[in-house]
Image (cartoon, helix red, strand yellow):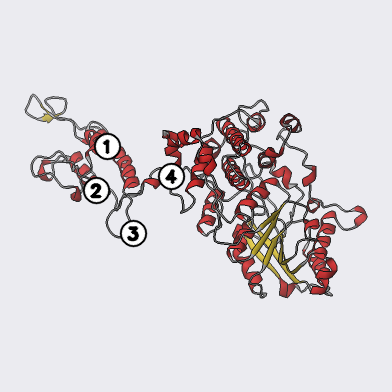
Amino acid sequence: MRLARPLPPLERGRGRRGLCGPALHLRQLLALLPRPRGPYPLRLPHARGPPRSHHQGAVSRPRAAASVALLRPPPRRRGAAGTDRPDGGARSRPRPLVRGRERTLVQGVARARALCSSRAAAFPRARSGPLRPRRATQAHPAPLRAGRLEREGHRAVARGAGAAHVRLIGNKTKLLGSIQRFLEARGVHGGTFFDVFAGTGSVGRHFRRLGYRVRANDLLWSSYVRQLVYVGCARVPDFSGLLELPQVRRRLAGRRGRAEREALGTAPPGQEDLYAAVAALALARPRRGLIWRQYAEGGPAGRLYFSDENGRRIDGAHEELLAWRRDGRVGQDGFWVLLASLLEAADRVANISGTYGAFLKRLQESAREPLRLRPPLLDLRSPAGRVYRGDANALVRRVSADVLYLDPPYNQRQYAKNYHVPEVLAELHTATDLRAYEAEIYGKTGLRRFEDRRSEYCRRGGRRGGPSPCEKAFRDLVRAARAEHIVVSYSEEGILDREAIGAALAEAAGLPAFDFERDHRVISHRRFRSDRNRNGRVYRVLEGRAPDEVGEWLFYVRKPRSRRRASA
């Protein structure tokens, strides 16, 4: 909170009503502070005159008594020669700049600024009209990560993105408007939308809000869980069986339970049970499970993806969630919703710079924050979609759609290895033998094999100068697609070049050549950074681009009905 105008300079000597310099300065300072509503006006020390009312700059007594006591000037004693001196001496000497009342004033200004912040939290000033106290649900907001990605995520939520930002290479949150306009310019305004490489699911959620019937697919378990919540969920799951448990009711009725529910804020109508279930899961007893042993600070593996406390809390929440599902207290939909909340909470406190390919040597500030679960922002107004987890090339042969959106991986790093920690957390409930599962974790970063999640789109090299495995897979994908409109989004830094993509689309549509001037666009945006520019690191700069600029290619082709029947 900033003052309405700058602080006035310190006035020495005696002022009106017999006040000395520091006390007069205090009155000027308090006049600049917000004016609360309170029944206890505080009277400042002065020589004469009635006490000022709270509408004239007074502050409530319980909050300001200690600060005003510090600001009151020290008493003066009569000197031997009749002169006023603090030490009672006979002669007047020049005083140091910071002694006595000046030091008291400096301390008092610091106290007053702290008072300013506390009063501003309780009485925020509206744009117009009188001061209004803040609602109780906003008095203790949940701590938010201060990083760039987290801020972008909350802007996306404000725009209606439906979920907090998740760190993932190739996230299309910033390009949603461009993709929508690119389709609308070609006469596409509705129908079935199939996002084959869903990732974070931002594209599918966006077109679901526009009225499309969305289909979403991804090989990764961490993406699959989130698609089930943000694309496939059209109603709030039933948590009545969970909230009937005596231990859960006691947990929520306690001091920590009330604080946790207050931090989550006011639930939207009809989602009160969801917010209560998330609060109950957040208060689960910490345990030393697989995540703590393999990826936390105090674990025997020595990996630093999470702090010791957060690692134990993740394990405790996960084991509690499994127990609720095993006992029938949480249905399958409720299980996915709570697991997605845990996945996103763990990602916010992960000690990484962008991907999980490596952890930082020391815990960064955001990783020291306590694990904080938040209810997923469900879209209950749009039609429910269908979610798959399978190979994209096999899936397009049996799932038809009006619009097929393709955003394949574009670099050689397998996504399952880049995001192996959330992948372990997302699929851990499927492990029948936990010891055998944990024995497969290896290496400095705790990787798993993930052989079933290796993508051909991440393979560059071809044999004897032929097409790369990535190009072969892409040609097969668009040729087998059962969709009228095909839209491709691809980074200009990817494995495939522009001509290869255009040739594959033209072949799939039965065209002699791809019309780049009509059906191709380039969107410039800021490059994804997994870490900061430090230690003299040099990044690749593309020709004609700024040092931090990269282009995203958009392609469109309309596939005739005869070609769609042939592919089926």
The residue indicated by pointer 4 is 141
**Residue 317 as seen in the image, left or right of residue 77:** right
Q: CA distance from mark 1 to mark 4?
A: 28 Å
Instruction: Say which label, 3 or 2, has the lower sequence index.
Output: 2
Do we see residue 31 in this rendering? yes
Name the secondary structure under disc 4.
loop
The mark closer to the camera, 1 or 3, is 3
Q: CA distance from mark 2 to mark 1?
A: 23 Å
Earlier-in-chain disc, 2 versus 1:
2
Q: Quadrant of residue 488?
A: bottom right
Question: Which dot marks residue 37?
Answer: 2
Q: Is residue 203 left or right of residue 91?
A: right
Sequence-earlier tag: 1 or 3: 1
Q: Residue at x 73, y 50 (%)?
A: 219
Q: Are marks 4 and 2 in contact (CB under 8 Å)?
A: no
Query: How far across and how far down the image is residue 100, in percent?
Result: 23, 31
Mark 4 closeness class: few <14, some 14–19, many ≥20 residues within 10 Å:
few
What residue type is disc 4 on?
Pro
- Comparing labels 3 and 2, the label whose residue is closer to the camera: 2
Instruction: Report which residue position mark 1 lands on.
Output: 108
